[in-house]
């Protein structure tokens, strides 16, 4: 998704803008641009494609102490120089960057064209913002932004500079992320923290419908009524190094290898010396739980797949009925949510718009909202009643890897906690599960230690365009995640099925050399999986199976087998997902793809 940065200070602005934009690259983009104010003249530079194309046409030494920058992920209008941001008004006195979508832009555009004779140059929705601000501008940029925003519907994080006010930057936020960085004689805006971490650790997290007025020595936040609001400074404690590659070829690979650490952090921060789960931030009591008769888990993409595993965990350990839905569907199906519902939102970024809007919808209907989120202080986190952070650290690769395994840990802990609260989980099972969860970091190291096996497999299959993932039980949930990972970074048309569904249609597609990833980690379903593998083998498929150590019978059936260390069936996804992540990674790298920033994708999907 689009990323925005802005700088106002005493130093030359351009290096700050370019550095900030480079840290936002992971969000996904197809063009970039900056605007600076030099002696009350706004100069704009934009280029389609990678940031280096923009860098090639600008002078880093430009004499401006204020500027805004943008990476664009095309929605309205193709990726092009002209559609790139910043956008300007006709007299080139105002420059605007925007992340989000202006839903009523057509109506505003028509009014500006027909009634105000404005000529538009781009196909974007965002250009209307520059013309609208210009229309209301009478010398006070903040005032004009208020009036313009009043006419706009949709989602936005906007940064604006005006020629006549060379020391002022104004920003506003609704449903798209916006943070302010506080420096010495300089202040910043950005879409997220990594963009500013090189310059400051002191951030202000801007809320919905808030406006920010920035000069080099002052930042003022206003609410929608133009009343000043105070905000505590959020001090970032994690290190910029955790957002660097540290010798790995790609962030994605580094993040796959960071999973033992993320899992350990997410688990151990919440276990006391007696192995009791202490969920700081979750205020559910047994009294509250008594009134809850249903759980909804809602998320998108990989977070949704973690939710599928979470559903089984809560049903198994706490015996509460759970529904799991993708956020873009949940929002529009008038779900049975009321004050007896526990709504669980799952999100790495905490800014995914569909997830956020589902959360708001659930709240409106009276549900209690608990969220599992990685980014501290994100919108989903702030709008929830109960909060469980996944301590994965910053995830830069667009493909979600360590976020997934830490989300699983959060779900297992929550499920065990709920089971203890409602008395449906016995202590023996509780302690067995906690003990095994504590073994997970070491077992993950064992899995990662076999990465070369997956590399070899990838070398033999990376050109195979016909790939299926199949599994039963929780392995079916995992099949969806494995398939998504492969398709999003390798661009192979893979898909996932419940192995039991094979005979109901999909088997017609199996032919010589179809590549099947068969997940067979569940003891209770192992024999059934062996039969499914035989069925596809009989039709010529090449089968790569993932099974638990000790279940050797599968060696006679599958072509290749990856053994994960033995573990409880419930917890197997934590380990079994890793070979599927490595497979996607190595296939993508062998195909020469941009692994960390796959085409058409954005890290944080802040539009519908
Ligand atoms: O930030 P979120 O966890 O809310 O993001 C949800 C999805 O957009 C995300 O998981 C997406 O599917 C990833 N590209 C998957 O690797």
Image (cartoon, grey):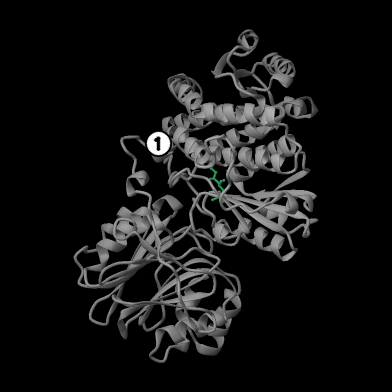
Q: Is residue 559 left or right of residue 249?
A: right
Q: Is residue 297 left or right of residue 597?
A: right
Residue 117 at x, y percent in the picture? 50, 87
Reply above or below: 578 against 386: above
Residue 317, image quadrant: top right
Q: Is residue 468 visible?
A: no
Residue at 24% from the left image edge and 77% from the top image edge: 38
The residue positioned farthest toward the front in the image shown? 274
The residue positioned farthest toward the bottom in the image shown? 138
Depth check: give the residue in front, 29 or 192: 192
Query: Is disc 1 placed on a helix, strand or loop?
Result: helix
Depth check: give the residue in front, 252 or 394: 394
Depth check: give the residue in front, 526 or 68: 526
**Circle 1: is it few (<14), some (14-19), or many (20+) Cα within 10 Å?**
many
How many numbered circles are shown?
A: 1
Beta carbon at label 1 within 8 Å of ligand 1 = no
Residue at 55% from the left image edge and 27% from the top image edge: 575
Residue 124 at x, y percent in the picture? 50, 68
Reply above or below: 34 against 348: below
Report the residue marked by disc 1: 254
Residue 217, image quadrant: bottom left
Reply above or below: 275 against 89: above
Q: Is residue 288 visible?
A: yes
Residue at 34% from the left image edge and 40% from the top image edge: 245
Residue 162 at x, y percent in the picture? 35, 81
**Image quarter hosting the C terminus:** bottom right
Residue at 32% from the left image edge and 82% from the top image edge: 163
Residue 207 at x, y percent in the picture? 51, 69
């Amino acid at each position: 998704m689009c990323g925005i940065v802005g700088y106002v200070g005493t130093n030359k602005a351009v290096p700050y803008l370019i550095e900030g934009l480079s840290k936002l690259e992971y969000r996904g983009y197809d063009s970039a641009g900056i605007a600076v104010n030099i002696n009350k003249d706004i100069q704009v530079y934009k280029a389609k494609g990678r940031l280096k194309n923009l860098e090639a046409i600008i002078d880093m030494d430009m004499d401006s102490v204020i500027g805004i920058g943008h990476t664009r992920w095309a929605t309205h209008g193709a990726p092009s120089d002209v559609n790139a941001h910043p956008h300007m008004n006709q007299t080139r006195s105002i420059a605007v960057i925007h992340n989000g979508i202006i839903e009523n832009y057509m109506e505003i555009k028509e009014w500006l064209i027909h009634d105000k004779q404005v000529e538009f140059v781009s196909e974007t929705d965002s250009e209307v913002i520059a013309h609208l601000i210009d229309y209301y501008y009478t010398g006070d940029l903040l005032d004009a932004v208020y009036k313009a925003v009043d006419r706009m519907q949709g989602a936005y994080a906007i940064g604006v500079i005006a020629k006549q006010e060379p020391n002022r930057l104004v920003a506003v936020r609704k449903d798209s992320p916006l943070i302010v960085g506080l420096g010495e004689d300089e202040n910043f805006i950005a879409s997220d923290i990594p963009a500013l971490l090189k310059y400051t650790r002191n951030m202000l997290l801007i809320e919905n419908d808030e406006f920010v007025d920035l000069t080099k020595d002052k930042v003022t936040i206003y609410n929608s009524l133009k009343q000043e609001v105070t905000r505590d400074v959020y001090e970032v404690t994690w290190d910029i190094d955790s957002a660097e590659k540290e010798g790995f070829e790609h962030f994605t690979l580094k993040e796959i290898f960071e999973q033992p650490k993320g899992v350990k952090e997410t688990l151990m921060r919440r276990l006391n010396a007696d192995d009791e789960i202490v969920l700081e931030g979750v205020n559910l009591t047994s009294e509250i739980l008594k009134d809850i008769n249903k759980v909804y888990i809602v998320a998108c993409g990989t977070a949704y797949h973690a939710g599928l595993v979470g559903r089984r965990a809560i049903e198994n350990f706490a015996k509460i009925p759970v529904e799991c839905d993708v956020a873009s569907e949940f929002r529009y199906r008038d779900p049975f949510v009321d004050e007896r519902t526990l709504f669980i939102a799952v999100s790495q970024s905490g800014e995914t718009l569909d997830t956020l809007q589902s959360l708001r919808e659930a709240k409106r209907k009276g549900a209690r909202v608990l969220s599992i989120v990685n980014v501290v202080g994100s919108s989903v986190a702030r709008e929830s009643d109960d909060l469980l952070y996944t301590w994965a650290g910053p995830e830069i690769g667009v493909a979600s890897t360590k976020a997934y395994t830490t989300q699983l840990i959060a779900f297992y802990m929550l499920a065990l906690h709920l089971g203890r609260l409602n008395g449906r989980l016995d202590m023996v099972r509780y302690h067995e599960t906690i003990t095994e969860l504590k073994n997970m970091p070491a077992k993950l190291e064992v899995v990662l230690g076999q990465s070369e096996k997956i590399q070899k497999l990838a070398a033999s299959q990376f050109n195979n365009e016909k790939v299926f993932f199949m599994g039963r039980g929780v392995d079916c949930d995992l099949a969806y995640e494995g398939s998504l990972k492969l398709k999003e970074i390798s661009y192979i048309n893979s898909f996932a099925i419940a192995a039991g569904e094979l005979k109901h249609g999909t088997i017609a597609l199996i032919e010589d050399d179809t590549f099947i990833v068969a997940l067979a980690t569940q003891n209770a379903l192992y024999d059934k999986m062996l039969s499914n593998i035989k069925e596809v083998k009989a039709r010529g498929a090449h089968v790569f199976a993932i099974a638990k150590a000790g279940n050797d019978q599968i060696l006679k059936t599958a072509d290749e087998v990856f053994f994960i260390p033995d573990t409880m069936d419930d917890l197997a996804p934590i380990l079994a997902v890793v070979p599927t992540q490595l497979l996607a990674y190595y296939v993508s790298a062998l195909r020469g793809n941009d692994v960390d920033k796959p085409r058409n994708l954005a890290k944080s999907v802040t539009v519908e």
